[in-house]
Image: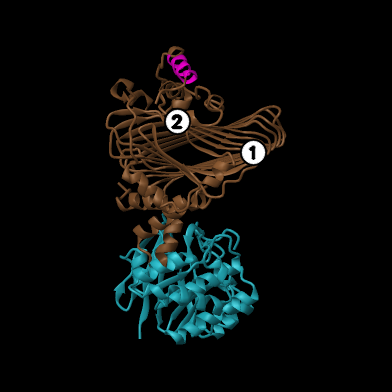
Chain colours: A brown, B cyan
Amino acid sequence: MSSPQWLVDRRSAAVHTDQFAMPSSEEEVWRYSRVADVDLSQWAIVSDRSEGVPAEAAALLDSLGHLAGTVVVRNGAVVASRLDEALVAKGVYVGSLVDGPDAQNSLGVVADGGPDVFGRLNDANFLDGVLVHVPAGVTVEAPIAIIDWIDIDGSAVYPRLVVRVGADADVRVLDWHGSADVAAFVSPLVELDVDRAGRLSYGNVQLRGPRVWQIASQVSRVLNDGTLTASHAGLGCDYGRMRTDCELIGRGATGNLSAVYFGTGSQTLDFRTFQHHAAPDTNSNLLFKGAVGGQSRSIYTGLIRVEKDARGTNAFQTNRNLKLSDTAWAESVPNLEIETNDVKCSHASTVGPVDEEQVFYLESRGVPTEIAERLIVAGFFDEVLEEFPVAAAVPLIAAAIDERLDAGVNS
Amino acid sequence: MGELRIQGLTAEVAGRQILNGVDLVVKSGEVHAVMGPNGAGKSTLSHVLMGKPGYTVTGGSVTIDGVDLLTLPTYERAKAGLFLAMQYPVEVPGVSLEELLTEALSALGRDASVVHTTVAAEAERIGLATRLLDRPVNVDLSGGEKKRNETMQLAVLRPKFAILDELDSGLDVDALRACSRRVEAATTEFNLGVLAITHYSRLLEELKPDVVHILAQGRIVSSGGPELADELERTGYAEWVEEEAPAAADPFADPFA
């Protein structure tokens, strides 16, 4: 399959305009990160197209119940896609980006070049890219699932996903990031575009293998009265980073951002969020909850930025962290930048061990300490998981959390 | 016939001695009320018995049927037959009551498969709306609901001995009656021994004490029959509070009590 000329031009432009200099962890947005350990020359960009649906991806799709559409991406290449006929007839598209409607304008619609060098690397190097396009007024009842699978050792992969939700359209998308147990460098760029009064619920599960390094970026744009709900589960990877840029640019736009993350062993999970209120009466609500065990580390830094015009804004940001072992480490830095008075804003952040009073309460009923702590940790994530956009994925996330608790996290 | 035996119990919190040698013996089926002024060490006693972190036992012993409780972690004390109905039941987000009791019954070596039906029956008996049962433990419950919930759990777990730490505090008349009646019934149903710690005597209208103790300055200063509670109702605790030595503050006590 050859790329259209516009894409070839775009890629070479990305390559030529940038030297791909690595950022420094001196920069606030990279502080505490492991970007200094990223050596791109160590990884080979995948250029051959993989074929066939991996058995793990097929099994995952089977476990998710009825899906309106599916896409399987293997090492950056779309290897399968399907969409209910009725939706095809309504103009919905799910599949390889270049074959989709208005492909040239869709790519980069929200995140032209992305927020940092990794976005530009994605622009230059992504293989196929996936497009989910829901025309104005169309409601997609069942979820659409994308399985992004990596199974080439030593590879550098740049997944690209663009979701475009038309005016008053409604869709739920599950974006599952998995891998075989390979060493790989993955840098996904996700663009979420919500038109007027559109509703997009996007759930992203990052459950890559333990030797994968992932630096992901999710950029969203919400127009007037549109609602974006974006949830993330960050569980896998040696180093797993996700940067979230939520741009509320239309009056009355809403962005609900949430995440659960669970670090064990020597993992580092790294989250940077930007809630950008650029229009009046916009609402954002962020809840990131994480636990760190073993010698793992987590970083959360978040910024709420309210522009001068964005009067009537409601913006909330909460980050809570459970520290399950003495050697685990969690950093939480919330920030506000507000240029108008007519706003309701708050931020809260906590880092601490499992609540001693809660453990005592459960123990006083006869529940052994270890089980009590387990119940509390599992329960800690409930309020996020209950709202996860694709309910069928929740038992899978909960099982992955259980697996980590089983493996032991206290030391 | 079992017994909960407390002998010469001394304990401190943050380096400050609160219990100065408590002696008490409760036998199965008996109800003992421990009454006392604020700061007498009532809550400390209940916390120390259950093994709450933050307290240091400096002397004495506590046994149930000869089993030494003080060396055991809290959950083993529960397994030995002790239950604490807390003054301020803790909210545990994300953990449902049914999950809690299933784990508790399993750990106690009991049949956990009946938990749903047992809980439903006990909840109805004590007037706790069954819609609350799927909710996270104590989250968004009113004061009265929390105390009914504590009592309901007591009934499901059927311990040998229950400490009721100010079960009556902040309770409306209906909830107080429901809770105290349920505990009273448990003393015959499963021969429950009760140590009811309270500041006021209204709990004892439905829950009939066999023995009333007065705790002051961290020790039992007087013991008697139910008439002692009536007397306290009339005279108050003035006799037991020494002017020159204000009662030691328990950092875990209710600041508004």
* In front of the other: B45 or A14: A14
- Image quarter of the C terminus of chain B: bottom right
Residue on which disc 1 sits: A136
Task: Kindly identify the amino acid type of the residue bearing the numbered disc 2.
Answer: Gly
- Check the residue under mark 1 and report the chain it is in: A
How far from the left and from the top, in percent, is residue B240?
54, 71
Task: Indicate yes or no whether the magenta region holds residue B42.
Answer: no
Q: CA distance from mark 2 to mark 1?
A: 22 Å
Q: Earlier in the sequence, mark 2 or mark 1?
A: 2
Helix, strand or loop for disc 2: loop
In x, y percent, where is residue A97?
A: 48, 30
Query: Which residues are drawn in magenta?
Result: A5-15
| Residue A9 highlighted magenta (yes or no) | yes
Q: Is residue A37 left or right of residue A191?
A: left
Q: Residue at x 33, y 51 (%)?
A: A403
User: From where the camera sits, is residue B114 visible?
Assistant: yes
Q: Is residue B31 above or below residue A97?
A: below
User: Mark 2–mark 1 contact, CB under 8 Å?
Assistant: no
Relative side of A66 to A282, left or right: left
Q: Main secondary structure of the magenta part?
A: helix
Please state the chain letter of the residue tagged with numbered disc 2 in the rendered image.
A
Judging by the rendered image, the residue that carries numbered circle 2 is: A129
Horizontal side of residue A320 vs A55, given as left or right = right
| Residue occupying the point 58% across, 60% down | B140
